[in-house]
Image (cartoon, rainbow, N blue to C red):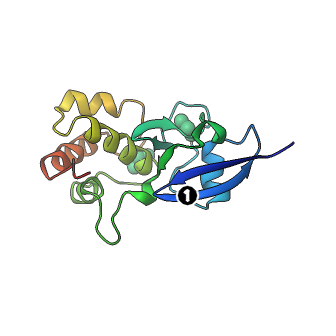
Amino acid sequence: MDRIPIEINVNDEKHQLLVEPRTTLLELLREQLFLTGAKEGCGEGICGSCTVLLDDKPVRACLTLAVEAAGHRVTTVEGLSDGEALDPLQQAFIDHGAVQCGFCTPGMLMSARALLFAEPQPDEKQIARALSGNICRCTGYTKIVEAVAAAARNNGDRR
Ligand code: FES
Ligand code: FES
């Protein structure tokens, strides 16, 4: 299949890549850029483990075509920290024991990051709603919601 040249900004770095029309953003991230934080769980838009930000809005990378992301700004979990300094959400997930197996964590963090961009001081219902598309098989969600609330209190809207 013919490949199409695209330019894409991922974690503040510009990349010129060749992609097939059917290539998903998740495949581009994982297989061409070797950014393996976004996970493929269901591959069908259900689990949220592939969530990344497109211009600060959460999207399912498994359902987004790479060509749709061309010319936009993509942020993955690898782009959350500032050098050695963790994003307040990452620190809060650690502090509150919100990570068990970790498979859902990158997607959870990106959905939570999008929430705090849009609503820096969310209440518990807003947090639960923002994370409702992210499935976690391990934690029971309580600690995740607590972690997001704590990050919001602790300068979660730092950007
Ligand atoms: S892998 Fe994309 S939503 Fe499950
Ligand atoms: S920590 Fe295991 S799926 Fe969420």
Is 100 above or below relative to 64? below
Q: Is residue 149 left or right of residue 93?
A: left
The answer to whether any part of residue 138 appears in the image is no
Q: Amino acid at mark 1?
A: Lys
Q: Residues within 10 Å of mark 1 (few under 14, many from 20)?
A: few
| Residue at 18 percent of width and 34 percent of height | 122
User: Residue 43's image quarter?
Assistant: top right
| Residue at 42 percent of width and 58 percent of height | 79
Is 112 above or below relative to 89? above
| Residue at 67 percent of width and 47 percent of height | 6
Q: Is residue 154 left or right of residue 91?
A: left
Where does the image place residue 159, in percent across and percent down from the top left? 26, 51
User: Which residue of the protein is positioned furthest toward the bottom in this rendering?
Assistant: 84
Where does the image place residue 152, in percent across and percent down from the top left? 18, 45
The answer to whether any part of residue 92 appears in the image is yes
Q: Which residue is mark 1?
A: 14
Where does the image place residue 90, in percent across and percent down from the top left? 30, 57
